[in-house]
Image (cartoon, grey):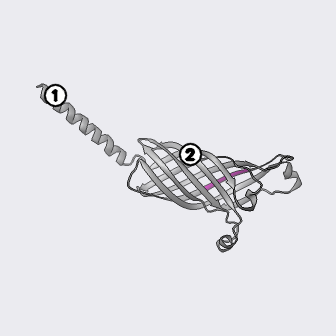
Amino acid sequence: MLRTGIKALGLMLVLGTAGTAAAQEGPQGRVKVFLKGGVGDYTGDVGESVKIGPTWGLTLNVQPLRFLGFEVGYEGGRNSIATDVLDLALTRHGGSALVKLGLPVLEAVKPFVGVGIGISRISVGGDLLQRGDYVSDTVKELPLVAGIEFNTGSLTAGARATYRPFLDQNIREQVEDPSGGYFDFSITLGARF
């Protein structure tokens, strides 16, 4: 009788564990929402006088297949201008949409790369605003991202690097004579549904 009870308990534990694993392999994790924060800086001519500054964002990721994902998100950042005399900062608010490709081998640890399209409003604030040395502008971007995600249950975390060349010229001119872009590194933390 005791042996039968132990076998039944063991069978229930095995089935319960298998059911939990099956639930995690099912639809859970196909939608992710996460916050990101890190540091960013401008490249090219603009980057010569701009300091590294904080970045932040909120992203929605949909994962229809294990190796393919789509993201839409908001990003922001603030960078001071390197000067001892004047107070000036560039504040960036933008949005982007990405297609991501990840290795479908492991769900728990997933390296990925991605490419997309974005647009940002870069606003100038501070003393130079009155002098007209810098002008607020809206720029088109081509986000290129590489990173790694860690997924377990309903949690997701990761790290990513993103470079956004500015596309205010046509693509041919941009390749031949790039005018710069924005580079950031961020840590992500969020939930899977």
Q: Please report the bounds of the magenta region as a residue range.
A: 91-95
Residue at x 72% of width, y 59% of height: 138
Give the farthest residue toward the left.
Answer: 1
Say what amino acid the circle numbered 2 marks.
Ile
Q: On the image, numbered disc 2 is attached to which residue?
A: 187
Residue 169 pos. (x, y %):
70, 69
Mark 1 lies on a secondary structure that is helix
Measuring from the top left, give residue 69's x and y in whole percent: 47, 56
Camera-nearest residue between 173 and 48: 48
The secondary element bearing badge 2 is classed as: strand
N-term mark: 1 or 2: 1
Identify which residue, 184 or 18, lies in the foreground. Answer: 184
Query: Which three-letter amino acid code belongs to the residue tagged 1?
Result: Gly
Please identify the residue farthest to the top as the structure is shown: 2
Q: Which residue is mark 1?
A: 5
In the figure, residue 181 lies in which quadrant?
bottom right
Disc assigned to residue 182: none
